Amino acid sequence: MQREIYDVTIIGGGPAGLFSAFYSGLRELKTKIIESEPRLGGKLNVYTEKMVWDIGALPPTPGGRVIDYLVEQAEVFNPTIVLSQKAIGIDKEEGVFVVTTETGAKHYSKTLIMASGWGVLLPNKITVEDSEKYEATNLHYLVKDPQALSGKRVLVSGGGNSAVDWVNILAPLTEEVTLVYRQAELKAHESQVSKLLAGQASYKGNHTITRFIADSTGERIAEVVLTDNLTGVETIIAVDEVVINHGYSEEGAIFDKNTVGLEKHDDFYVQTSFDNQSDVPGIFAAGDVVSHSGKLHLIAGAFHDAGNAVNQVKKYIEPEAHSHGRVSSHNHKFDEKNIPLKAQFFG
Ligand SMILES: Cc1cc2nc3c(=O)[nH]c(=O)nc-3n(C[C@H](O)[C@H](O)[C@H](O)COP(=O)(O)OP(=O)(O)OC[C@H]3O[C@@H](n4cnc5c(N)ncnc54)[C@H](O)[C@@H]3O)c2cc1C
């Protein structure tokens, strides 16, 4: 079968990967993104409802909207976007990198940009009987749209910032919301805990979910059995939706199965130079995966890395190319796209 070889393959579709894709297009590179999740956005998916204030020039914007903007920008030059494929191996055949994913698919590329953050973020799952089955209906590890829970009876399990924030967001929307945590004292920021305790939500500290009781279809959770960790006494709560927020674990498998010598530092990081080159010629890195003393672990830092990494890719493939892309304000690639935009702004 014919191998389709890309100029650059970006592993990870978070802020670093998405901006790398845009910038690769600007530099006229044939580009592919491989993302293990069924959705783009990376860690922003963990805080879609939070306001993000620290992206230069962008007014305070919910994380979910930041994802929309990033995806729209990434798609300007039509990169190939591959979702739901976790990269698990990197090899090199006849001078071309081969990225193998969990599905068995192989992706061929002259260069790679590692934009894999801290690896694949996996929610810590609850180990109560049948919990996996209920993931198809009313057991959630991620709340994408709080409005979907509006008017319902919701039980949230967890004691960290994320769980407490979700309860505070859901309290005014839902019919009732209960927070369950295995310890007495919540671990979240004091101000958020005070807000929760002063509001309409119920809090059951020192309790653990020990059983789910199904509805008549057997497909949905109708009631949750909580056990008091001190006394062993059980309480049953009727629910419409259950949200589990027990934190995340990261998995950096791709680094373990590579034959090209890409090394993992401190579990997830790629050691790079200041201009985002790894120790392996042809492999570059951007975003949270990057490790060097000047690295800024913010979305703004991911953008800076992405620009650098793409410029290095360009030079690697075409040594005579300019070391930087032309600024967008004076780049003729945008001339045609600018016509309707200018009409919108200047009439
Ligand atoms: C709760 C929280 C709040 C934050 N708030 C802010 C904020 O207000 N402002 C700010 O600037 N920053 C904030 N950050 C940090 C910011 O989210 C990160 O710096 C940013 O997401 C890094 O982008 P990235 O693309 O490098 O990594 P990520 O966002 O982690 O994206 C990496 C992507 O790579 C994918 N991936 C990983 N391994 C593989 C693989 N083997 N194969 C395929 N895909 C893979 C992952 O699924 C993920 O989609 C926050 C972080 C958290 C956790």
Image: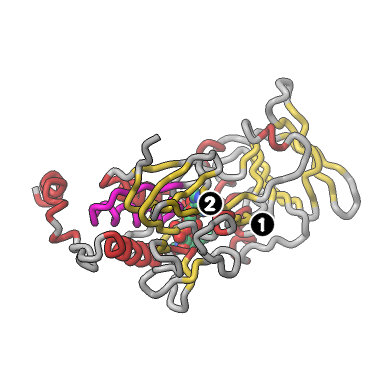
| Frontmost residue, 211 versus 262 | 262
Characterize the local packing of mark 1: few (<14), some (14-19) or many (20 or more) Cα atoms within 10 angstroms.
few
Q: How many marks?
A: 2
Instruction: Give the magenta range.
Output: 11-34
Residue ID at (37%, 47%): 32
**327 sits to left or right of 176:** left
Q: Is residue 47 visible?
A: no
Q: Amino acid at mark 1?
A: Leu
Where is mark 2, residue-wise?
A: 89
| Frontmost residue, 96 versus 326 | 96
Circle 2/circle 1 CB separation < 8 Å: no
Percent position of residue 51, x then y = 44, 57
Q: Residue furthest left?
A: 347
Where is mark 1, residue-wise?
A: 197
Residue ID at (40%, 56%): 112
Q: Quadrant of residue 253?
A: bottom right
Q: Amino acid at mark 2?
A: Gly
Give the position of the N terminus as an image quadrant.
Answer: top left
Query: Which disc number belongs to residue 289?
Result: none
Q: Quadrant of residue 78?
A: top left
Q: Earlier in the sequence, mark 2 or mark 1?
A: 2
Q: Which mark lies nearer to you, 2 or 1?
A: 2
SS under mark 2:
strand
Q: Residue furthest top?
A: 217
Mark 2 to mark 1 CA distance (whole Å): 48 Å
Percent position of residue 343, x then y = 11, 46
Q: In the rendered view, would you say 115 is above or below 31?
A: below
Residue ID at (36%, 54%): 110
**75 sits to left or right of 183:** left
Percent position of residue 153, x then y = 65, 37
